[in-house]
Each structure stands twice: as C-alpha cells, then as structure tokens.
C-alpha cells in the first residue's frame, strides 16, 4: 500500500487525544480511547496490543476504561444465541484437564521494563543484545510481530534522533526517562503517536537513560539536511 507523505514543519504535541495535567497517578499523554477499545476487543494489532498492555501495567488510568469495554463485550456474548458444541467437545476438555502440566520456566528479570515486554524480548533485561544505531542510541528489535516493527530503544541523555517523518504510524511508549518532541515532554507511561503528518526530531532530556517501546507500521523517511543520506542505507 502506498502512502502519501505530507510534511509539516510544526509538529502538534499529540494526535487526537486529550492532554492531561500530570499527577502522581496519571500520565500526561495517555492511550486514546479508540485504541483502548481496540485493545479490549482484541482487534488491536499484536504490536499495539503489547504496547497498550505495557502502558496499562505502568499507569492505572486506562484500566477502568478497558474493564468497561470488556464488560460490554461480555454482555453482548451473553445476549447472543447459544451455539451447539461439536461432538466430543466435553470429553476433550475433561481429558485435557487430566493431562500433565509441564513446568514453566521462570519469567525473565524485567529490570525497569514491564514484565510482558521482557517476556516478549525473550531474555533478562541485563542480557538484552542491544545494537548500536547512533552515538548514545541502541535498539533491540523484537521478532514475531509480522509486518509491524517492534523494538526497544535505549537512549542516553542529550541524544537526538535524526529528523524524520513516517510512511505509516509510529507509537512510542516511554518506560523510563524523558523525551522531548515538538515542545512536549513525554515521561514514564506517556504515549507518543505520530504518522505521515509529522516531521520531527525527538531528543532525550533530563539526566536518566530513556527506555522506550516503539511500534512501527511503516518505514521512516529521514528529512534533515544531513540525515537524508540515511534513506539510502
């Protein structure tokens, strides 16, 4: 599918969801309600489902909304006509209950990451095989998400990403540290959503290493004076 790219010079601080005044138990840039609905109904893409679940692990404010959507879905299921079970279905379920259960390996040590992100990464936080991308910036790509590109990003204070726009959508969840983008500061639990309308250059602020979970549904296109050469690499 071809994307039409329209570059704008001034980036809005967020896309299609309210900006909250930060409190101890709230994020300033929460998950928008339509995405919470997709997560609750199981229609979110695998990468976005991982990201939204991780955000809900960090911040409480969206959990009640998800619970309401799930309750509504349960009510619709209860109101639906009953379906006949296939022949032998009950016997198969009962036999499965008697089957031995293999011992599960211990979950990985997540470090500062939500546990589900460490499980998706497949290793302890201390063992993540980071790959150098730029001075101060390393990335670990998490496989198994189909056409989406799901990755962890580790960026040191002062690091600035090359200026770029998108041919698709980019969702970035800040897990630790702080990221400035378009005049807005994204901190732990904040979600940044950008697409082909945005031409931006995020940078890491503060004195803490910034870890982010990033989900891309399309490629990046570098637009800076010097970073354009990266489009050919």
Image (cartoon, helix red, strand yellow):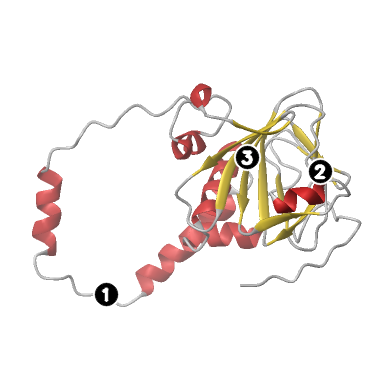
The answer to which of marks 2 and 1 sits earlier in the sequence is 2
Marks 1 & 3, CB-CB < 8 Å contact:
no
Locate residue 95, reporting x and y percent: 9, 50
The answer to whether residue 72 is visible is yes
Residue indicated by mark 3: 59
- Mark 2 vs mark 1, CA separation in Å: 46 Å
The residue under the point 80% across, 58% down is 198
Q: Is residue 117 left or right of residue 12?
A: left
Q: Which mark is residue 21?
A: 2
Callout 3 secondary element: loop
Number of marks = 3
Give me the residue at 74% from left, 27% from top.
156
Q: How many other residues sit within 10 Å of disc 3, few (<14), some (14-19) or many (≥20)?
A: some
What residue did someone put label 1 on? 82
Res 15 quadrant in image: bottom right
Question: In the visual, does 158 lie left or right of 46?
Answer: right
Q: What is the secondary structure assignment of the residue under circle 1?
A: loop
- Sequence order check: which comes first, mark 3 or mark 2? 2
């Amino acid at each position: 599918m071809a994307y039409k790219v329209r570059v704008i010079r001034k980036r809005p601080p967020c896309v299609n969801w309210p900006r909250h005044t930060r409190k101890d138990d709230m994020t300033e840039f929460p998950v928008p309600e339509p995405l919470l609905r997709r997560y609750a109904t199981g229609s979110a893409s695998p990468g976005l489902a991982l990201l939204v679940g991780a955000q809900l692990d960090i911040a409480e404010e969206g959990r009640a909304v998800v619970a309401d959507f799930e309750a509504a879905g349960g009510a619709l299921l209860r109101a639906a006509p009953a379906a006949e079970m296939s022949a032998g279905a009950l016997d198969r379920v009962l036999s499965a209950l008697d089957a031995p259960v293999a011992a599960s390996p211990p979950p990985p040590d997540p470090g500062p990451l939500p546990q589900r992100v460490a499980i998706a990464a497949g290793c302890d936080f201390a063992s993540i095989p980071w790959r150098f991308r730029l001075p101060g910036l390393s990335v670990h790509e998490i496989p198994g998400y189909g056409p989406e590109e799901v990755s962890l990003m580790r960026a040191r204070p002062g690091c600035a990403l090359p200026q770029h726009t998108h041919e698709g959508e980019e969702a970035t969840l800040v897990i630790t540290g702080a990221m400035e983008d378009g005049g807005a500061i994204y901190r732990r639990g904040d979600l940044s959503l950008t697409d082909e309308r945005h031409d931006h250059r995020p940078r890491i602020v503060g004195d803490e290493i910034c870890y982010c979970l990033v989900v891309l549904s399309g490629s990046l296109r570098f637009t800076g004076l010097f970073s354009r050469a990266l489009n050919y690499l």
